[in-house]
Amino acid sequence: MSTTVYPPSMWTDAEIDSLTENHKSLEDHKQMEALIEEVRNIFHSTENGKIIPSAYDTAWIARIPSIDNPSQPQFPQTLKWIVCNQLIDGSWGGDSFYLPHVRLLITLSCVIALRIWEVEETQVQKGIDFVNNQTSLYLDETEYSSLPSGFVILFSSLLKEAHALSLGISHELPFIKKMLAIREAQLKGIDMGVLHSLTTPLLVSLEGLQELIDWRKILNRCSKDGYMLGSLASTACIFMHTGDKKCLEFINLVVTICGDYVPCFYPSDFHERLLAIDTVETLGIGRYFKKEIKHALDYVYRFWTDGGIGRGRHDTIVNVNDTSMGFRILRLHGYDVSSEVLKIFKNEKGEFFSFADKTHREVEGMLSLYKCSQIAFPGETMMKEAKTFTESYLRNLREAKHSCALARDVTGSFGVDYALKYGFHRSLPRLETRSYIDGFWLADNSWLTKALYRLPYMNNDKYLQLAKVDFNTVQSIHQTELQQVHKWWIDSGFRKLKFTRERHMEIYFVVAAGMFEPQYGDSRIAFTKVGCLLVVLDDLYDKYSSSEEIMLFNEAFNRWDVNIVVCMPEHIKICFLGLYNTINELAEKACKVQGHDMLEYFKNLWKIQLESFTKEAEWTKHKYVPGWDEYINVSKVSGGFGTTILTSIHLMGEVISNNTLCQIDERSKSLHLVCLTTRLVNDTKTFKAERECGELASAIECYMKDNPGTSEEETLDHIYGVIEDGLIELNQELFKCTQVPRCFPNLLLNSARVSQLLYMQTDAFNNSIQDKKDMVDKCLFQRIR
């Protein structure tokens, strides 16, 4: 019998008792309902997506001469819009976010449109002054490295038009001369055969390549509706050169819908639907919009092809951002999608790019691909290659502290840093939601194409308002449950046991951070109580009982007789009565849910559990190191996740048939993989401390026994590989498990994920680690203001 001194709980009784004080500040239920309805209406409004006006594209539409009277504009309302939307500094563009190069491009485009029709000379001059003033500031060549894609070609082409129109923009300024020189160099590298025959992002900038384009050939690159590769400006340019009726019809359609302006692209039906789903699910409010999410995903899947998707159904330029986001969300929801859809973005060197032409990358697209790559299935080489490449790319980007020219801070707390630190298999819904809310960007976010654009339906603070109210409401429910568990721990007498760990806070976090929804309260409490019993009995069997006491405890359990332990030491009585009373209590509650007696089922779970504890106690006593297979068969049970999961699922409110149960219990591969990966990652961080305490059996020692000459480092590398492969297998088992209520596979998945999180760098479960306390506090203690 040995005693190990464990760090005390990181939370005091006073902290836990004070949680009730927060309940008084809960938001009114009516506010919650109103916000849910507002967000639901946003979902229903995203038929074709909605984007704010693009002054750049509107200026190109305004250039189009009337087909009846070429001396007048075909769309005079767009010209009027330009006149009415000049900013006070003489520029055009959104006033919520400022990128100098983008503002220059937009302003020059608007000035040219006004000069073509010889209107508003005063405004033209204000615009010219802005351009001249701004270009005179760009003297440092480091500025050129952060220019938006296509900027040089577009801006330089506009400069030539400005010169032809005698707009008075100096070509002698260093910035202007540099732009013109870069353009000439870029044009020499363009393969016109490729440009006319392949769908490439360079075509989105074709209005900057007018002198090189064969306009009849380029018509073949338009969509069947006359739309040019996701750009209203490019579509307008094609029409002015070809007079193509379909191009004009499409422009007419968009102007009619928008009124007096056009967005930078239309429609954005895929992009907005996927972004809305990703947003509500990450914010933890997806459960309110299940019908809307299903409808949106069915819509995207209807258009899904193995060639990827763009921002909308008319967009023939597929991009890695929307394709990866679509793939990830569809797979997570059980849709059949192939990872081969990503091959279009990979070159022969194994490098990935943002577009199929494989010419450049964007941070947002690489981040989306990285997230997507982590929900791989076994044998998906494409996903493995994508993960390797994007992880390296993003780490290098972060180390170089390179900032993306987007309003979104992709290198901030919820961008690259978060993704690289946690990944999919070390992140948890509540942790992710809290991080997302704390660093929420969407209400003021802009994206960048030729110009900055915003999505009004997505740039809406109702998402954030609802998420905050919901988080605090759910947190208050969790706090009440936590107090119940805390009281049970004390009333059961476990605090009197000086040999064991007080970890009910951590165990409640383990389940609540994943299965957070209010309706699963009984299941969370059951999971926590069973988890606490597992910790207590593991310590009892491992460190604080003789072989005779273990045998007597097992006999009392098998007879289910409290009288057997009456004469036993006090610590044995406390442990047995705690187990006896808790199992009876949980069986009674589960009976009400399932409609039949659950006591024998729960007792059988614990019979198997205690047998594994007994076996490990024998190994320790005899200093025995088993082989790998023998060890895994016992230790994946002793880890306890099977017992906690199979107890708590019976209290989730769903009646479980045998057909359902066999897909998630010990007969299933899913539970085996959860128990295997949790045990192995635990061992990688605890084996040295346990070896010092005389517990020799661990995955590391057992593997080295079976493989003489293998070093500890090589063994750990092997085990990390087994864990990674196991998690990939678990992906396939759970995401294809579509015939059972989703809450069951989600519980298994999050049980596996939380172990990867807690043992990511050290043994955070047993030790007093500040990162652990911060995570628990953010999820369970700290309200969002």
Image (cartoon, grey):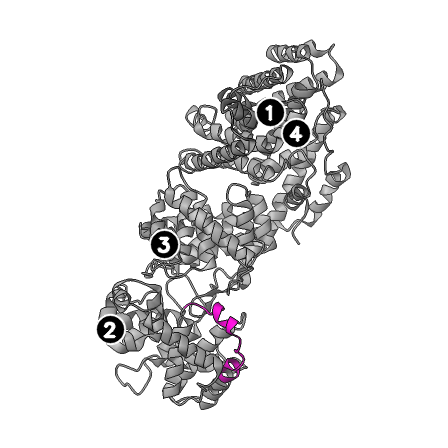
Q: Is residue 403 visible?
A: yes
Q: Quadrant of the C terminus?
A: bottom right
Query: Hey, which quadrant is residue 116 in on the image?
Result: bottom left
Q: Is residue 297 above or below residue 641?
A: below
Mark 2 neighbour density, 10 Å: few (under 14) some (14–19) many (20 or more): few
The residues bearing labels 4 and 2 have C-alpha atoms spaced at a distance of 73 Å
Residue type, label 3 = Phe
Q: Is residue 768 left or right of residue 667?
A: right
What span is colored magenta in the figure? 131-149
First in residue order: circle 1 vs circle 4: 1
Q: Give coordinates of residue 29: x percent, y percent.
A: 60, 49
The residues bearing labels 1 and 3 have C-alpha atoms spaced at a distance of 52 Å
Magenta span contains residue 138:
yes
Q: Give coordinates of residue 574: x percent, y percent.
A: 72, 19
**Residue to which mark 4 is pinned:** 689
The answer to whether the residues at label 1 and label 4 have Cβ atoms under 8 Å apart is no
**Residue to which mark 1 is pinned:** 586
Q: Residue at x 55, y 42 (%)?
A: 428
Residue type, label 2 = Asp
**Residue to which mark 2 is pinned:** 214
Mark 2 falls on what kind of element?
A: loop
Mark 4 falls on what kind of element?
A: helix
First in residue order: circle 3 vs circle 4: 3
